[in-house]
Image (spheres, coloured by chain):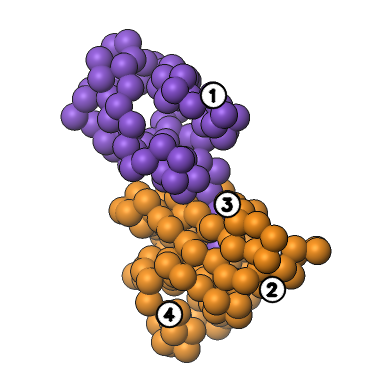
Amino acid sequence: MYYLNISDSPIDVNALYQKLKDPQYGGIVTFIGTVRQWTGNIETRFIDYSAYHPMAERQLEKLAAPIEAQGARVVIEHRTGHLELTDEAVFVGVAAAHRGDAFRWCEYLIDTLKKDVPIWKKETDTDAVRWGD
Amino acid sequence: MKLNVKLFAMLQEQLGNVVTVDVPEKPTADQIKQAVSVSSPNLQQLIGTSRLAVNQEFTSSGSLDVSPTDEVALIPPVSGG
């Protein structure tokens, strides 16, 4: 069963990885998004994330359920609130019988999360405050 | 018909948590967005690229079966991850 969580608590990468381990799976792919300092010439100091609860959780369920229906396991956690450089903002993990499906679904999940899940970042850079990418 | 529209992110910062708009019965998403942007022309472009959600589901095109008791939200372009 999938595990989906959006909260202000720091992401415990190892604890989430443990949720993916299971004898039926032979391939686990994880993506971890972290707070980056430089985007071209723009220097980021910190990022604040906010979400529309519980719509964001419902959107994650819609992404995860069809993948789980094909026999894989999905673990997604997104952090909200105040994040400093190098903090983990998002964890997406897929465990599948074989690596091909795990790679493909993990990429699909993070790509779709970035388009369809109502979460926003407010980036405080050294020169300005910016919403979004 | 008056609808309360929830706002998020930059829209929330500029306009507050909720705005009340007056729209016709069975409005389209564009009509609701237009009603929100009337009072804030400087946000017209951002509102134009925002999506509408009713009861926490993104809406599709066409007129919406929406009433003042429904939860209506304007979702600016998301940027999670």
Q: Say which mark, if any, is on residue A131.
A: 3
How many numbered marks are there? Answer: 4
**Residue nearest the observer in this picture, B27 or A130:** A130
Chain B color in figure: purple
Tag 1 subunit = B
**Residue nearest the observer in this picture, A30 or B58:** B58
Counting residues from the start of the chain, the first of labels 4 and 2 encountered is: 4
Q: CA distance from mark 4 to mark 2?
A: 19 Å
Q: Position of residue B53 (x, y in %)?
A: 38, 36
Circles 3 and 1 in contact, beta carbons < 8 Å? no
Q: Give above or below for B74 relative to B61.
A: below
Side of A127 where A14 appears, left or right: left
Q: Position of residue A7 (x, y in %)?
A: 36, 69
**Which secondary structure lies at badge 2?**
loop
Q: Amino acid at mark 4?
A: Pro
Circles 4 and 1 in contact, beta carbons < 8 Å? no
Q: CA distance from mark 3 to mark 1?
A: 19 Å
Counting residues from the start of the chain, the first of labels 2 and 3 encountered is: 2
Q: Amino acid at mark 2?
A: Gln
Tag 2 subunit = A
Q: Which chain is orange?
A: A
Q: Position of residue B58 (x, y in %)?
A: 42, 37
Circles 3 and 4 in contact, beta carbons < 8 Å? no
Tag 4 subunit = A
